[in-house]
Image: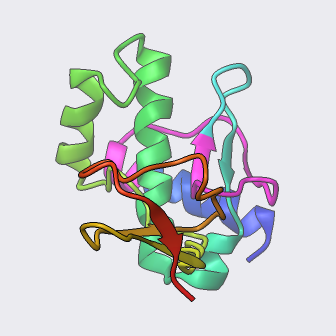
Amino acid sequence: MSEEQLQQLVERISIDVFHKPFLHQAVFNSRLRTTGGRYKLADHFIEINPLVIELHDEEELIGIIKHELCHYHLHLEGKGYKHGDQDFKQLLKQTNSPRHCKPLVKRPAKRALLHLYRCTACGLDYPRRRRMDCTKYRCGKCAGKIMKVE
């Protein structure tokens, strides 16, 4: 999708859903990492993350555009355009716009457990990701000596 096609799509959604024209510019911004899009207050641009098109369907893209248009129209009208404002929440509901977009990045897997320590007195296990000096620590339950389990 080109930026010209994006501009036309945003203008069409604005008229169809909000019954108001979109008079500014919609662009792709590949520097966006975790969000699907953003509305810029200073110049009224709407920026869309191009990953949305690669990773998700057109319905997700339309949802993000509607969400950003909620910010846009409320800001221009002088109403509450922030996520926590009641005006914004109402307009999201009226236009059936999503509050959040689907994740654009895969979350890294949790780091594996590397070290296991055990109290010699009560047998309580201490799983750790980092090594620890057993001579400096005692068991928190019984104050027994802690040993590394091989």
- Left or right: residue 73 compared with residue 44: left
Identity of the residue drawn at 49% across and 19% down: 76
Residue span colored magenta: 15-38
Q: Position of residue 91 (x, y in %)?
A: 25, 37
Identity of the residue drawn at 57% across and 76% down: 115
Tell me the quadrant of the picture where the N terminus can be found: bottom right
- Left or right: residue 60 compared with residue 44: left
Q: Position of residue 6 (x, y in %)?
A: 67, 63
Relative to 57, say whether 27 is above or below.
Answer: above
The question of residue 20 being in magenta is answered with: yes
Tell me the quadrant of the picture where the C terminus can be found: bottom right
Q: Position of residue 25 (x, y in %)?
A: 72, 42
* Magenta stretch prevailing secondary structure: loop
Identify the image's colour scheme: rainbow, by chain, secondary structure or one colour. Answer: rainbow
Q: Name the foreground residue: 25 vs 141.
A: 141
Instruction: Quadrant for residue 120, please give it.
Output: bottom left
Q: Name the foreground residue: 143 vs 131.
A: 143
The question of residue 99 being in magenta is answered with: no
Instruction: Quadrant for residue 70, please give it.
Output: top left
Identity of the residue drawn at 18% across and 45% down: 94
Q: Position of residue 23 (x, y in %)?
A: 63, 35
Q: Residue furthest bottom?
A: 150
Number of numbered tags placed on the structure image = 0
Q: Name the foreground residue: 103 vs 65.
A: 103
Relative to 39, say whether 84 is above or below.
Answer: above
Identity of the residue drawn at 41% across and 16% down: 77
